[in-house]
Amino acid sequence: MAEITDDPLPPELKSVIVGFCGSRDLPNVALASKEFQALAEKQIYVSIDVASRGEKGIPALNAAVGNTSRPAYINFLSIEIDGSEWSHPADQSTIEMFLRAAPSMSGLKDLRIRLREELSANISGMNDMLCAGRFQLTTLFVDEELDFPRIVQEQKELNVVMIYSSDDFPALPMLLSAPISPPLIMLGLAQEPTVYPMFLNHLAIAPEIVSPSHTSLGDLVKAAFRRDVMRGFRLRLDEIKIISVFLQSPTWQDSIQPYMKCVVDLFTEIDELHIHLHSPGEFKSRAYGPQSRFSWSGPGKRIL
């Protein structure tokens, strides 16, 4: 890379220069001057992908924690604590680093964290951090143990929440009876054992939580899937094989057709569709996919 000097270049030109630099060049650009450092670091720390096993991204997170301005540059943060049975020395320290730096991440918009069960002691701290008002997320991927009614009330700009869950998706029925004010797409993700890496192939949705203003449902979900960088559990639209739909009110079934049409168009490889109705009433069966296995569960008969 050509040498960059401290010539009095206008700020706009310096910004253009940094914009043309690749990720490998940015650390060198940051050494040129204080102005170049500030511009380069905004690009270096805008997206951080951390995987504790292999220690990917941990130096970047550590560097952000040790600086007063860098955490504010982070827009996208993905933290994957390996789901295998063996712990890694960096697991707990990675979460602690994140919790220390989180109050300063004022620009954070997309947060994705997957923890192992033995790290559940951090759940209370994560609940408090997500509800402290330090940042306003638009996308959140997290484990099912968190306090979602509280989080969605505090995070007013949320568009998409995806919950890494067990197959019964306990968080979604709970949220159906909670007051949800912001427009929100709430999805649950689970997987059946496959060869490594596992694809998350079971998706749960709660249409009653989705605001009618979400006309771009498909675009929002596709964008959320596209940015996924997890390694142990992969996200791909064509790997979703099972859809579970959770409904609180039987009257909502009259409005579900356009929503389900969008879901079927989005996830083209669905093999099974399950409807879960959580209040008395009969659900009218409709075919939403030519190759789908349809089932209904609730206080009444079951349709297969």
Image (tube, rainbow, N blue to C red):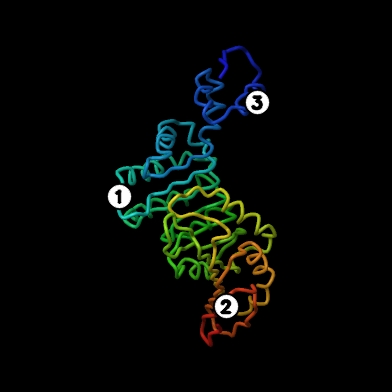
Please indicate whether residue 115 sits to the left or right of residue 235 in the image.
left
SS for dot 1:
loop
Q: Which mark is residue 294?
A: 2
Decide which of 15, 51 is in the foreground and name it: 51
Residue 42 point in image, percent of width and height: 55, 32
Q: Residue at x 59, y 74 (%)?
A: 292
Residue 82 to residue 301: above or below = above
Q: Earlier in the sequence, mark 3 or mark 1?
A: 3
| Local crowd size for mark 2, using a 10 Å CA cut-off: few (<14), some (14–19), many (≥20) | many
Q: Are marks 2 and 1 in contact (CB under 8 Å)?
A: no
Decide which of 236, 179 is in the foreground and name it: 236
| Local crowd size for mark 3, using a 10 Å CA cut-off: few (<14), some (14–19), many (≥20) | few
Q: Which residue is mark 3?
A: 16
Q: Earlier in the sequence, mark 2 or mark 1?
A: 1
Quarter of the image where the C terminus is located:
bottom right
The amino acid beneath tag 1 is Ser
Residue 19 point in image, percent of width and height: 62, 29
Q: Which residue is mark 1?
A: 87
Residue 68 point in image, percent of width and height: 45, 31
Q: Residue at x 50, y 20 (%)?
A: 31
| Local crowd size for mark 1, using a 10 Å CA cut-off: few (<14), some (14–19), many (≥20) | some
